[in-house]
Amino acid sequence: MKTIGMLGGMSWESTESYYREINEGIKQHLGGLHSAKICLYSVNFNEIEKLQHAGDWDAAAAVLTDAARKIEAGGADFLIICTNTMHRVAPEIEQAISIPLLHIADATAYKLK
């Protein structure tokens, strides 16, 4: 089983939803006491929200890029961003890491087919 890298905290409620849905899917698919292998980094949403409000997307990207690098160093095989809005800085994050970033728009398009 691959290790999922979760970049969360924007908000913690959103992150909790991703965590729960992923693990419910694993349990349904594999049964028993199986759960997902996850490396989770939760940023301080207050910091991110202030950067969003100020329109400082470069600084927000820097915070998330730093977190993504930590997730990668923690052994994640790929990364997901546990919020819609911050996919705005996905290109910057992708350039900073060597593991794949699974973009929410790609997952949405796949489900719509």
Image: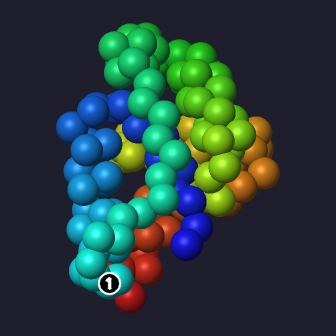
SS of the residue under disc 1: helix
Near-viewer residue (54 or 44) = 44
- What residue lies at 52% left-to-right and 46% top-to-bottom? 39
Quarter where residue 50 is shown:
top left
Q: Is residue 21 left or right of residue 9?
A: left
The residue tagged 1 is 29
Count neighbours of disc 1 (C-alpha within 10 A) and say few if under 14, some if 14 to 19, many if 20 or more.
few
Quadrant of image for the N terminus? bottom right
Residue 20 shown left or right of residue 109 in the figure: left
Quick one: 84 or 1, which is closer to the camera?
1
Which residue is depicted at the point 28% across and 81% down?
31
Q: Residue furthest bottom?
A: 113
Residue 86 visible somewhere in the drawing = no
Q: Nearer the viewer, residue 5 or 61?
A: 5
Residue 66 position, x and y percent, is: 65, 27
Q: Amino acid at mark 1?
A: His
The reply to whether residue 48 is visible in this rendering is yes
Question: Picture quarter containing residue 105?
Answer: bottom left
> x%, y% of residue 13?
21, 37
Tell me where residue 60 appears, x and y as whole percent. 54, 22
Residue 40, above or below 113: above
**Residue at (61% x, 58% y) in the render:** 78
